[in-house]
Amino acid sequence: MKLILAIVQDKDSNLLSSQFIDANIQATKLSTTGGFLKAGNTTFIIGIADDRVDEVLKIIKETSQTRQQFMTPPVNLDATSDSSMAYPVEVQVGGATVFVLPIEAFHRF
């Protein structure tokens, strides 16, 4: 038995949730916020048998797309530094961050 924690961008979460339902994979869906862009993410918590881990990872990989997005870095208000304005920079966002953890016991009540 494994515990999979998958953090995906909100834009991909509905499609991923639908794919899990179609594959009869039970997942708990949590709204989360990323620290870098402070943008909405969704974290899926999945308890799954060892022989289905690859199937879950394949679904996550196929539905969680990376994309380019512009962000404006925070303005540095330190008077001793350069006072130039921050300009938007293009960054890669999306995809998925996935943790696969061993589970000692699993109970459903």
Image (cartoon, rainbow, N blue to C red):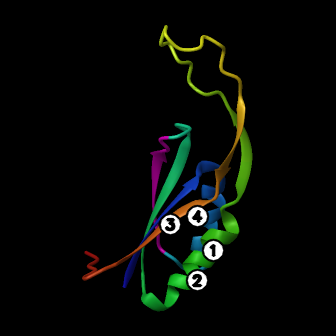
- The stretch in magenta equals 26-35
Mark 4 lies on residue: 17
x, y (%) of residue 32?
46, 47
Decide if residue 38 is on the left or right side of residue 16: left
Under circle 1, the secondary element is: helix
Point out the frontmost of discs 3 and 1: 3
Decide if residue 55 is on the left or right side of residue 92: left
Q: Quadrant of the C terminus?
A: bottom left
Q: Residues within 10 Å of mark 2 (few under 14, many from 20)?
A: few
From the viewer's side, name the closer residue of 34 and 78: 78
At horizontal 63% and vertical 74% (from top left) the residue drawn is 59
At horizontal 49% and vertical 8% (from top left) the residue drawn is 79
CA gap, disc 3 and disc 1 = 12 Å
Under circle 2, the secondary element is: helix
Disc number for residue 59 = 1
Q: Residues within 10 Å of mark 4 (few under 14, many from 20)?
A: many
Point out the frontmost of discs 2 and 4: 2
CA gap, disc 1 and disc 4 = 10 Å
CA gap, disc 2 and disc 3 = 13 Å
Point out the frontmost of discs 2 and 3: 3
Under circle 3, the secondary element is: strand
Mark 2 lies on residue: 55
Say if 72 sits above or below 106 in the image.
Answer: above
Q: Amino acid at mark 4?
A: Ser
At horizontal 28% and vertical 80% (from top left) the residue drawn is 106
Q: Amino acid at mark 2?
A: Glu
Q: Give the mark nearest the N terminus, 3 or 4.
A: 4
**Residue 33 falls within the magenta-colored stretch:** yes
